[in-house]
Amino acid sequence: MTASEPTKLFRSVNQSIGQQPSLGPIPANLLAPSGAILVSFYLLVEIILSLGFAPFLLLSAWGVSTWWIVVGEKTWTFAHKFASIPEWKRGHLPYQPLLGQEDE
């Protein structure tokens, strides 16, 4: 093998395999709840109460940080508690044909 030939001993590996997706320091699974908290506090503080920008920043930082502390990296461990569980039941009904009674 000469120096000009690329070596085929090593393969390049994608470094992001196995990592949690994120936007900077913010994990991707917390973007939607944080956005909802920001919008709701904006509507409450700025539009309805007209308190100003500083209370909006303080309350939204409090809301987002509280959500991040409660939920953490594993959002599903907290949020799945509020999803309703479907009630699947077995029904024991006699068979009824769709087109009516068939005479034999």
Image (cartoon, rainbow, N blue to C red):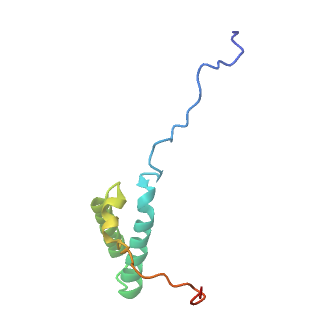
- In the rendered image, which quarter is residue 77 located in? bottom left
Residue at 71% from the left image edge and 16% from the top image edge = 5
The N terminus is located in which quarter?
Answer: top right
The C terminus is located in which quarter?
Answer: bottom right
- In the rendered image, which quarter is residue 12 located in? top right
Residue at 72% from the left image edge and 14% from the top image edge = 4
Q: Is residue 51 left or right of residue 9?
A: left
Q: Is residue 67 above or below residue 10?
A: below
Farthest residue, direction top: 1
Question: In front: 61, or 88?
Answer: 88
Question: In front: 26, or 11?
Answer: 11
- Image coords of residue 19 (percent x, y): 45, 44
- Image coords of residue 30 (percent x, y): 41, 61
- Image coords of residue 66 (percent x, y): 28, 65
Residue at 44% from the left image edge and 82% from the top image edge = 94
Q: Is residue 83 above or below residue 75?
A: below
Farthest residue, direction front: 104
- Image coords of residue 28 (percent x, y): 45, 57
Residue at 42% from the left image edge and 72% from the top image edge = 36
- In the rendered image, which quarter is residue 64 located in? bottom left
Question: In front: 54, or 64?
Answer: 64
Q: Is residue 93 left or right of residue 16?
A: left
Q: Is residue 73 above or below residue 100?
A: above
